[in-house]
Image (spheres, rainbow, N blue to C red):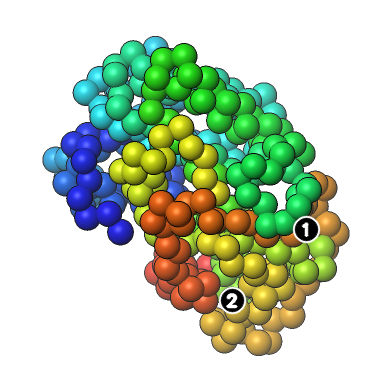
Amino acid sequence: MVDHFPFKSALVTGGGGFIGSHLVERLLKLNVKVTCLDNFSGGKMENISTYIDNPLLTVAKADITDYDGIVDLFKGIEIVFHQAVSKNSVCLINPRLDLRTNAEGTFNVLEASRTHGVKKIVHASTGSVYGEPRYVPEDELHPTEPVSFYGTSKLAAEKYGMVFRQLYGMDVSVLRYFHVYGPRQEDNDYGGVVSIFIRRALNGLPPIIFGDGSQIRSFTYVADVVKANLLVACSPAASGEIYNCASGLKIPIRRLADIVLEQLGRSDLRIQYSGWKPGDIKNFDISNDKIKNIGMSFDWDFEQGVAATVQWLRGKYGGQAG
């Protein structure tokens, strides 16, 4: 973990969200002056409530799709962690919002950063930019052929970042996330599968698997994702580079369900199965060699991470979900 951080001020878009709030927390512990920018449509004040009285923290309720409403927030900022996103689950419901948030919103963040001379931008992207695997393990040179609106808008955001780098010399790095999980992840039906399974089991409901449970995911614990963000921020070698931010673990969804039921002592619950989701990619086999080559290590064991998520959700629901 980075103990010395060279930037004195940071702005985290989506700072009230799942990953963003963990970044805000870590930056404050490093004595960085942090601006949390969030429209709180998905993010929650409760995610950062522990730090709300910290004099280093400024919370700005604003929307990245509104350039005039955000541009002044970038004044005096040295580094931006761009975490704000329209979730994958939103893209089929409202693809135009997905486009505005992920593509236009990213353009606005980049333009505001350029206007105020931000030194570094770490952009959160997604493994969905790859689409169906042509070969495994998928490395950063794999063709980008997204099969969803979400993957397409996030790929456009990446491209904007690299064009700003080429045209204006801005220091931009990209992290492609894969199946991030942990405390504060949304556990409603549009949230992450780890939290959904735990919430259902806490409520005495069985996990529902779409497909046969053989599909593989590269689950990555949120603390490791925060670590990767700080590493890329501090590494000169990361300038202009794109990295897979994935644990490298290969966990079948059926194994996830079994682990959740084991940890909660709910062997009485029988896993239910439903039809495959349209466009669901069956096998994620991800190479993380490139980010490891600049010093990254993924420290969290999967069962350990699930246990930490179980503990948090127990606290949230008082032992039982609603």
Residue located 34% across and 31% down the image? 120
Q: Nearer the viewer, residue 158 or 18?
A: 158
Query: Residue 13 appears in which quarter of the rendering?
Result: top left
Q: Is residue 16 visible?
A: no
Mark 2 residue type: Val
Q: Position of residue 178 (x, y in %)?
A: 58, 53
Q: Nearer the viewer, residue 80 or 99?
A: 80
Q: Is residue 239 visible?
A: yes
Q: Position of residue 194 (x, y in %)?
A: 58, 64
Q: Is residue 275 left or right of residue 288?
A: right
Mark 1 residue type: Lys
Residue located 59% across and 84% down the image? 262
Disc number placed over residue 282 in the picture, else none = 1
Work out how far the residue at label 1 is from the one at label 2, CA to CA, in angstroms: 21 Å
Q: Is residue 277 above or below residue 45?
A: below
Q: Nearer the viewer, residue 229 or 92?
A: 229
- Label 1 packing within 10 angstroms: few (<14), some (14-19), many (20+): some
Residue located 39% across and 41% down the image? 237
Q: Position of residue 169 (x, y in %)?
A: 40, 19
**Residue at the disc numbered 2:** 260
Residue located 59% across and 67% down the image? 249
Q: Is residue 246 above or below residue 73?
A: below
- Is the C terminus in the top left, top right, bottom left or bottom right quadrant? bottom right
Q: Nearer the viewer, residue 233 or 75?
A: 233
**SS type, badge 2:** helix
- Is the N terminus in the top left, top right, bottom left or bottom right quadrant? bottom left
